[in-house]
Image (tube, rainbow, N blue to C red):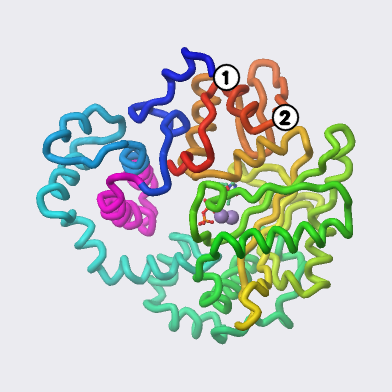
Amino acid sequence: VDATEVELLSHTAKYSCLRPSPLVCPNQSLVKEIDVIRQGRNVEGEERSMLSYSRAISVIKAYPHVITEHNIRDIHELPFLGVKILSMIEEFLKTGQITEAQTMLANPRFQSLSAFITIHGIGPHTARRLYDLGLRTLEELERYYEVKPGVSDEETMPLLDAEASANTEAAGERSIKIGLALRHDLGQTIPREEVEEINGTIMRELGHIQKGCKSVIAGGYRRGKPQSNDVDIVITHTDWNLGSQKVKGLCRKLVQRLHEQGLVTHVMYLSGFHEHNVLRTHHWDSLEKALTVFVSRHNSSRRNVYRRVDLIFAAPEVFWTAVVGWTGSTMFERDLRLWAKQQKGMKFDSSGISRRHDSKLYHPRTERDVFKVLGLVYIHPTLRNA
Ligand code: TTP
Ligand code: MN
Ligand code: MN
């Protein structure tokens, strides 16, 4: 790597895509405490404040030493740590906790809202609406939505109905019903070997539809998490020149086949199902993708387990861009976009990299190329836990 580029990587950098961030950092218990406050802002919809806490947490995650009374001076040099957060850090050093975090944890409203947003399909906004209706527990939500726990009503929820690709209230409610019915399974994390097995099963089924495809398991798994909340698989074709055509329309065909095989029971979202896709809002990339519920038969001794599996299809020329875009973390992605825009006059998202003044498109052939095109030093996936 070029010597001038190496200087760019620093735990004091403003962009998290310049800060190597391990999965577990030397100040993990401090991070956990501040994260409670961040979550408090999240459930209340205070987005600016939440982002400030997210940035502060991210900066601490990249700091390579245990913070003590002796090096607290160095902490003042780090970006995004304002007066308030610095005083919280000092309180934590003295007492091992932060009063505001402890108050938050004891708050019944925080407890209800936090529980509600663990359900797939329920975001902070919906959580607050349900709370305002007087609902307090997940059992009360089940009664409200008339969902029987452990049973997902597959009869009344056809796999590929119009609602799966529409941004309507009905689609939202359908998603919540699935999330509630399957909450005991979907709330469990997925070990790495099962993630690999799910990828293997899906690629074997894909081989029956189109030969020559390949995949990379992205998301938290790729960042080294021992347990994942879902499985994110980015798929392309190995033929650089003809792959684009071979990948087109594959997402829908694969989901259909997986459903026929009894491997996929629900599709929360499917792009490319309708010609005009109303869900293609600004923060969604334009790749073909399906957010599914997959039946995992990993434990042969136990019953099948429902798992969330995201399938993302990319043409070969944007495959590595898509892999970087779906590897995360969310903060790392956010800052990749910001860096590209503010420092390079470029646009980055999972579906492509372009230069703004002439719309030139970049087609990186490797993951390292993605970083090079963006003028960044390569950071290994396991150090992208910003
Ligand atoms: P997630 O699967 O939501 O999160 P994760 O894999 O980091 O952690 P876990 O599943 O264990 O909770 O998202 C994976 C990455 O994909 C995320 O870091 C950012 C990216 N992403 C997009 O680019 N677009 C999207 O619409 C979503 C939902 C995620
Ligand atoms: Mn994931
Ligand atoms: Mn995902």
Q: Quadrant of ligand 3?
A: bottom right
Position of 165 with respect to 92 (left or right) is right
Where residue 366 appears, x then y in whole percent?
68, 31
- Which residue is rendered at x = 49% and y = 17% of the image? 5
What kind of residue is marked 1? Gly
Magenta residues: mostly which secondary structure?
helix
Among the 4 quarters of the image, the one containing residue 386: top left
Among the 4 quarters of the image, the one containing residue 306: bottom right
Which is nearer the eye, 134 or 139?
Answer: 139
Which is nearer the eye, 168 or 227?
Answer: 227
Residues shaded magenta: 25-54
User: Where 304 sits versus 28, above or below?
Assistant: below
Which is nearer the eye, 16 or 202?
Answer: 202
Question: Circle 1: is it few (<14), some (14-19), or many (20+) Cα within 10 Å?
Answer: some
- The image quadrant where one finds the N terminus is top right
What kind of residue is marked 2? Arg
Position of 385 with respect to 326 (left or right) is left
User: Where 45 sits versus 284, above or below?
Assistant: below
- Which residue is rendered at x = 60% and y = 23% of the image? 372
Position of 344 with respect to 268 (left or right) is left
Location of mark 2 (residue): 365
* Disc 1 C-beta below 8 A from ligand 1: no
Q: Is residue 178 magenta?
A: no
Where residue 240 appears, x then y in whole percent?
83, 33
Where residue 232 appears, x then y in whole percent?
63, 54
Which numbered mark, 1 or 2, is in the foreground of this view?
Answer: 2
User: Where 233 sits versus 1, above or below?
Assistant: below
Q: Are marks 1 and 2 in contact (CB under 8 Å)?
A: no
* Disc 2 C-beta below 8 A from ligand 1: no
Location of mark 1 (residue): 345
Which is nearer the eye, 275 or 331?
Answer: 331
Mark 1 or 2 closer to N-term?
Answer: 1
